[in-house]
Amino acid sequence: MSSAIDREITDWFDSDGLLLMKLLGVESGQRVLDFGCGIGGYAIPLADAVAPDGRVFAVDKNSDNLGELRKRLSGHDHTKCVSIRHTDGGINLHWLKAGSLDAVLVFDVLHIITDWQTLFGEMRRVIRRGGALYVNPASLSHPGEVNVRALMEVLPSCGFALDYSVLARAWHYHKPSTEEIFVFCAV
């Protein structure tokens, strides 16, 4: 790995990831789900943003990714803010109570999920009224893989209203890149 990439990764985990979470409106004390957390590119900055009293639920179907996340969290200041959960690849969030979350983050996973209606319906169930759904369809880095127009049609039928979108540096396949992030409000 080149030193420039090493620096980007260090910067992401030291400051840039937290800056993105703050830009999106994540606050101390919140309860946030990182759906499809991978190796922790967002779970760790989320932990920094919600600490000391908040909680991040990091879920993924890939055991290797979760193992890498556990390694990255070892020795991290806010390790106890993160609950890691292995899933079977399903989109049922039955283990979370209705209205128990302030926000859900769905970044760079929509291209592998076919049933958006069920996914976002379940997310709406667990997000409190007025809570946020943060979506990065990774349409800039993977043009055409996620139909953003279809996404914008599904979300209102699941109880979400588009609040705004922002171009920002996001974590994408082990490195930061500029992506469009949509912020929806649970209505």
Image (cartoon, grey):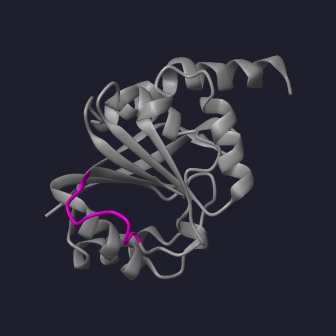
Residue that appears at 43% across and 26% down: 18
Residue 138 visible somewhere in the drawing: no
In the shown orientation, is residue 112 left or right of residue 47?
Answer: right
Between 36 and 85, the residue placed more toward the observer is 85
Q: Quadrant of the C terminus?
A: bottom left
User: In this picture, is 18 found above or below 100?
Assistant: above
In the shown orientation, is residue 60 left or right of residue 30?
Answer: right
Q: Is residue 96 magenta?
A: yes
Residue that appears at 59% across and 72% down: 89
Between 68 and 18, the residue placed more toward the observer is 68
Q: Main secondary structure of the magenta part?
A: loop
User: In this picture, is 118 found above or below 14?
Assistant: below
Between 37 and 54, the residue placed more toward the observer is 54
Using the rendered view, name the quadrant where residue 155 is placed.
Answer: bottom left
Residue that appears at 60% across and 21% down: 75
User: In this picture, is 98 found above or below 27?
Assistant: below
User: In this picture, is 161 found above or below 57?
Assistant: below
Give percent across and percent down for residue 90.
Answer: 53, 75
Give percent across and percent down for residue 67.
Answer: 70, 45
Using the rendered view, name the quadrant where residue 166 is placed.
Answer: top left
In the shown orientation, is residue 151 left or right of residue 108?
Answer: left
Q: Quadrant of the N terminus?
A: top right
Q: Is residue 54 magenta?
A: no
In the shown orientation, is residue 174 left or right of residue 155?
Answer: right
Q: Which residues are the magenta region?
A: 93-101
Give percent across and percent down for residue 154.
Answer: 33, 77
